[in-house]
Image: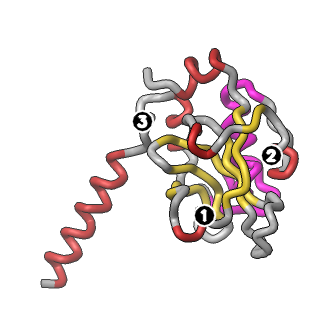
Amino acid sequence: MKKVTALLMGLVLLLAFQAGSAFADSKLNGFIDGVIGTPYKSGGTSSKGFDCSGFTSYVFTKMGIELPRTSVAQSKAGTKVDKTDLIPGDLVFFDTVGGNNSSVSHVGIYIGDGKFAHSSSSRGVVTDKLNSSYYETRFVTARRVMNDESFEAFANEK
């Protein structure tokens, strides 16, 4: 019975990872998929290890878009976007230091279908749901740093 359960769990995981993000055929997704699993590294800005803003800066640099280095500075870039109006490529910001006082301490990239990619201090580069019990209560704001041309070139499906 344990073997059957393990086999079924493996199959479920395989199918879950095959599904990909809501924009699986985009260039942006390719940049993100290429670093999923990269370990967390405080101050990290390369595929050897990322912190959250190092991850977002790395991905956007691949698209020729310069972002400020820190999550706080990134939260002031671009144009503010309502959570209900998110599109793939928007930056999403959170208060993860525990105060829930709307101060920004974490950033990720919205990938569609209610999910975002980020560099978690405990799990490295992963995807999570915006409405998870942890992140929903810590959401602070979102910013759009791509213009329509960049969206069409990188985040829209091919």
Mark 3, mark 1: which one is toward the viewer? 1
Q: At numbered mark 3, what does the secondary structure look like: helix, strand or loop?
A: loop
Picture colour scheme: secondary structure
Q: Quadrant of the C terminus?
A: top left
Residue 142 location, quadrant = top right
Residue occupied by mark 1: 135
Would you say 23 lies left or right of 125 here? left
Q: How many numbered marks have been drawn onto this rendered protein structure?
A: 3
For marks 3 and 1 on the same chain, the one whose residue lies earlier in the sequence:
3
Does 77 appear above or below 44? above
Residue occupied by mark 3: 24
For marks 3 and 2 on the same chain, the one whose residue lies earlier in the sequence:
3
Q: Residues within 10 Å of mark 1 (few under 14, many from 20)?
A: some
Pick the residue in front: 57 or 7.
Answer: 57
Residue at the spot x=57%, y=24% of the render?
A: 154
Bounds of the magenta segment: 39-65
Residue at the spot x=87%, y=46% of the render?
A: 73
Would you say 11 lies left or right of 61 here? left
Does 3 appear above or below 25? below
Q: In the displayed image of the protein, which residue is found farthest to the bottom?
A: 1
Q: Report if residue 42 lies within the magenta region.
A: yes
Pick the residue in front: 89 or 38.
Answer: 89
Residue occupied by mark 2: 75
